[in-house]
Every structure is written in structure tokens, then in C-alpha cells.
């Protein structure tokens, strides 16, 4: 097993961490891999599932249109936020947080297209309603270390997408996953957790509007120690749509087990984060480019 002897745990993983602190998410042999299934979509096998949709479920027509478009281009799951963590509290005039209405609209889109749903949960009091209306619960970057939330989400036994905190080490991230895995273990389940790299803070991000850097290196680093699938999210990482395609392709080449990106039928008028979302046409182009790259590394993006 990887890791160095280190009596003084720091920001990176020691052998002791791997052997004693993350027994449920650590690999028990070099080829140990877990398959996580959400809404019939398997993560951790040859298929690299692609999760696409808008930042915010702005209204029913928008999410249905997006769902139809992303399904046609080859997406495997529909993503969209109903409960939204936004960096500052003053919303734009275009934006309102749809909350339970957003969950209803996601269900309409699922009925129309058959696409399973992944959506974020932020509050313990909303876990029940969010879980009843999705196939996979997303924990956002800002809540990665909200341990009471991780524990309660774990108790549902539902598949979880755990985003990496944008300032979190691999050590922090896997310890957070262990909180969820512990609850799955108590339910007698294998851990149903997909880790999602979504960009980390860095000194240089190459554009004023880009706050994060996609840490491609964490994909093989995480896969070296954990059996959980590792996803990449180039939209939030780059915060700049023109860079999303190349970072999608690079993520597949780096061994990502799944991909997510933001797609909006009318990016310029997206209520949140218009700079980073791809149009339906751009998404179709990205999916076409992903196919040969996936094939080159022995994977596929076609279900
Ligand atoms: C999102 O997926 O829309 C989101 C808010 O992501 P993150 O938590 O990575 O910022
Ligand atoms: Mn977003």
C-alpha cells in the first residue's frame, strides 16, 4: 500500500492514515474497485458516465429542454441545483432559489427523458425531500467537511457524489468520504460514494474570473488509495467554457471514472455562472470528442 511512515500527520496521507483511519474507503488490494450504481447508471466500470445540466433548475421548461438535449447528445444523468449554495447572499434579479419547486421540475424532466437525477443537498432538514426526488445526492464543495450533514446523508444509504472542498487535501477528502462510508457500512452496504474533483484554489488560474485549477493529478492519486470511483468537473474548475472541452478530454485520459459539466440551452442568459456553462450544441461537440479519447484509454462514454 502507498504512503510513508509519518508520526505527525500533515496534509497528505500517511501509511497510518490509510491503514487505520480510512479502512472503509481505502483499497484492500491494488485492483480493488467498487461499482456505485445510481438510477441504473454504474460508476467505476468501463463506462464513464456523463452528468450534465444547468447550475440551477430555473423553471420547468428550461430543465425539460435541457434534459431532452443532453440525453440526445449522450448524457447518462441530469444534474441541476434546486437548493443552491451561492458565494454571496445578494441574488441577481434573474435568480431565485427554486428549492422544492426545483425538485418537482427535475422529476418532470426525469419522467420526460428517463434520465436519473443528481442534485445537491445542503440542509439536514431537507435530506428527506431531496432524497425522495433524486437518484444521487450531491454534497457540494462548501459542505465537504460538514460532518453532521455527511453522517445524515450516509444514513439514507443513497448513492452520494462527494465534491472535494476547494481547499481540501486528498487526506481531508477521503476522511470526509469515510464518514459517509461508515453509515453505509452500518446499513450493511458497500460504500456508495463517487468522489468529484471540481477545482482547487491555486496561486495562478490564468484568468481573472477563474478562481480554481482542475487538479488532474488527484485522479490517479485518489485511485491509488481508494476503491471509490473518481469524477471530474471541468465546469466549476475552469469557470470558463472555452476550457471545458479540453479539460473533459484530459480528465478521461487521466483516468476519470465519470464527468460532470454544466449545460444550459441559453448560456448567456443563465441565471448563475453564465461564463462556464456549455450550450446544448457545445455539449454535443464535447461528447463527440470524448468518444475516441475514452476508447483510447479502454473506456467508453456510450451506455
Ligand atoms: C454545482 O455543482 O453547481 C456546485 C455548486 O458545485 P461546487 O459545490 O463544486 O461549487
Ligand atoms: Mn454550479
Image (cartoon, grey):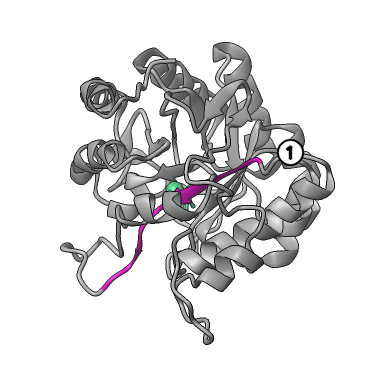
The residue that disc 1 covers is 131
**Picture quarter containing residue 2?**
bottom left
* Residue 52 in picture, x, y percent from top left: 43, 31
Q: Foreground residue, 207 or 267? A: 207
In the figure, is residue 293 to the left or right of 41?
left
Assess whether residue 200 is covered by the magenta stretch. Answer: yes
Tell me the chief SS of the magenta region. strand
Magenta range: 192-202
**In which quadrant will I find the C terminus?**
top left
Judge whether 285 appears above or below 162 on screen. above
In the figure, is residue 158 to the left or right of 51?
right
Q: Foreground residue, 35 or 31? A: 31
* Residue 273 in picture, x, y percent from top left: 37, 50
Judge whether 32 appears above or below 175 on screen. above
In the figure, is residue 25 to the left or right of 94?
right
* Residue 41 in picture, x, y percent from top left: 56, 23
Assess whether residue 273 is covered by the magenta stretch. Answer: no
Local SS, label 1: helix
Q: Is residue 144 visible?
A: no
**Picture quarter containing residue 174?**
bottom right
Q: Residues within 10 Å of mark 1 (few under 14, many from 20)?
A: many
Judge whether 17 appears above or below 247 on screen. below
Amino acid at each position: 500500500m502507498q504512503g510513508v511512515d509519518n508520526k505527525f500527520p500533515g496534509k497528505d496521507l500517511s501509511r497510518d492514515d490509510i491503514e487505520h483511519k480510512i479502512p472503509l474507503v481505502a483499497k484492500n488490494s491494488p485492483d480493488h474497485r467498487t461499482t456505485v450504481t445510481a438510477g441504473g447508471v454504474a460508476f467505476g466500470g468501463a463506462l464513464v458516465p456523463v452528468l450534465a445540466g444547468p447550475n440551477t433548475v430555473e423553471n420547468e421548461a428550461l430543465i425539460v429542454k435541457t434534459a431532452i438535449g443532453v440525453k440526445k447528445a449522450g448524457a447518462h444523468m441530469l444534474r441541476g441545483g434546486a437548493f443552491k449554495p451561492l458565494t454571496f447572499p445578494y441574488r441577481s434579479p434573474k435568480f431565485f432559489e427554486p428549492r422544492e419547486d426545483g425538485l418537482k421540475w427535475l422529476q418532470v424532466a426525469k419522467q420526460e427523458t428517463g434520465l436519473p437525477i443528481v442534485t445537491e443537498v445542503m440542509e439536514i432538514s431537507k435530506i428527506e425531500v431531496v432524497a425522495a426526488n433524486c437518484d444521487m445526492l450531491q454534497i457540494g464543495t462548501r459542505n465537504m467537511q460538514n460532518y453532521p450533514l455527511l453522517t445524515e446523508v450516509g444514513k439514507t444509504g443513497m448513492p452520494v457524489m462527494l465534491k472535494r472542498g476547494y481547499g481540501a487535501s486528498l487526506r481531508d477528502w477521503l476522511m470526509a468520504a469515510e464518514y459517509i462510508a461508515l453509515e453505509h457500512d452500518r446499513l450493511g452496504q458497500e460504500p456508495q460514494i463517487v468522489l468529484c474533483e471540481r477545482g482547487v484554489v491555486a496561486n495562478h488560474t490564468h484568468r481573472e474570473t477563474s478562481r480554481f485549477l482542475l487538479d488532474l493529478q488527484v485522479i490517479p492519486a485518489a485511485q491509488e488509495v481508494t476503491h471509490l470511483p473518481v469524477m471530474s468537473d471541468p465546469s466549476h474548475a475552469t469557470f470558463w467554457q472555452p476550457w471545458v472541452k479540453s479539460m473533459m478530454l484530459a480528465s478521461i485520459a487521466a483516468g476519470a471514472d465519470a464527468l460532470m459539466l454544466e449545460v444550459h440551452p441559453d448560456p448567456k442568459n443563465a441565471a448563475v455562472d453564465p461564463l462556464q456553462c456549455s450550450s446544448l450544441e457545445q455539449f454535443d461537440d464535447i461528447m463527440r470528442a470524448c468518444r475516441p479519447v475514452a476508447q483510447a484509454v479502454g473506456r467508453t462514454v456510450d451506455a
